[in-house]
Amino acid sequence: MRVWRFTHKRFVATAFSGEDGRLFSGRWHTKGTPLAYASEHAALCVLEALVHANLPELRDFRLVCATIPDALIDEGPTSDELPAGWDAPTAPRTTRAVGDDWLARPNRGVALRVPSALVPGHNVLLDPIHKQWHKVAHDDTVRAVRTAARQSTDNPSPTRP
């Protein structure tokens, strides 16, 4: 599975280090353990970042990709299996417990696939200190995020071609 992470160009080399997860709690874990959040699709990881941050200069951000062997990815709960309110703007303890319990399990994978709280789709929690992390391929390609092209004067609608 290919996964994507959206990061400032200064942090491309450490995009999957999990340092953010060590310093800050997220929807799917409690701070203290290195953990990197990524998404199955580039567009979803950008959306996830945009709703959580004020990013004035998108030109300074990059999409970083990694490939994880499918055998090292654990399936988390589906959105239907989670309690009501799991997708609230403020992450509830129930979702943090999912990630914390996964991190505490022996014989688990390098990654946990979880539903996005924003749109249909999945995010992937990555454990960079897992004993099999070396099997995750960090793709050489780092794609720059481009700002939208100027709107044509022939088409006043920003959402229609």
Image (cartoon, helix red, strand yellow):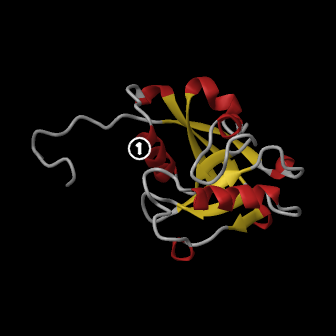
**Circle 1 SS class:** helix
Residue name at image x 43 percent, y 52 percent: 89
The image quadrant that residue 55 belongs to is top left
Q: Which residue is mark 1?
A: 51
- As shown in the figure, which amino acid type bears the numbered disc 1? Val
Front residue of 88 and 12:
88
Residue 147 shown left or right of residue 98 in the figure: left
How many C-alpha atoms fall within 10 Å of the one at disc 1: few (<14), some, or many (≥20)? few
Name the residue nearer the viewer: 29 or 121.
Answer: 29
User: Going by the image, does 101 lie left or right of 132?
Assistant: left
Residue at 66% over, 51% down: 29
Q: Nearer the viewer, residue 126 or 106?
A: 106
**Residue 153's quadrant in the figure?**
top left
Question: Outermost residue, bottom direction?
Answer: 80
Please provide percent x and percent y for residue 142: 60, 36
- On the image, the x and y values in percent for residue 121 come to 50, 63
Which quarter of the rendering shows the N terminus? bottom right
Expressed as whole percent of the image width and height from the top left, the position of residue 81 reads: 57, 76
Q: How many marks?
A: 1
- Can you see residue 65? yes
**Residue beneath the point at 46% across and 64% down:** 85
Write the residue at 22% across / 52% down. 159
Q: Is residue 142 left or right of residue 32?
A: left
Q: Residue furthest top?
A: 10
Quadrant housing the C terminus: bottom left
Residue 1 visible in the displayed image: no
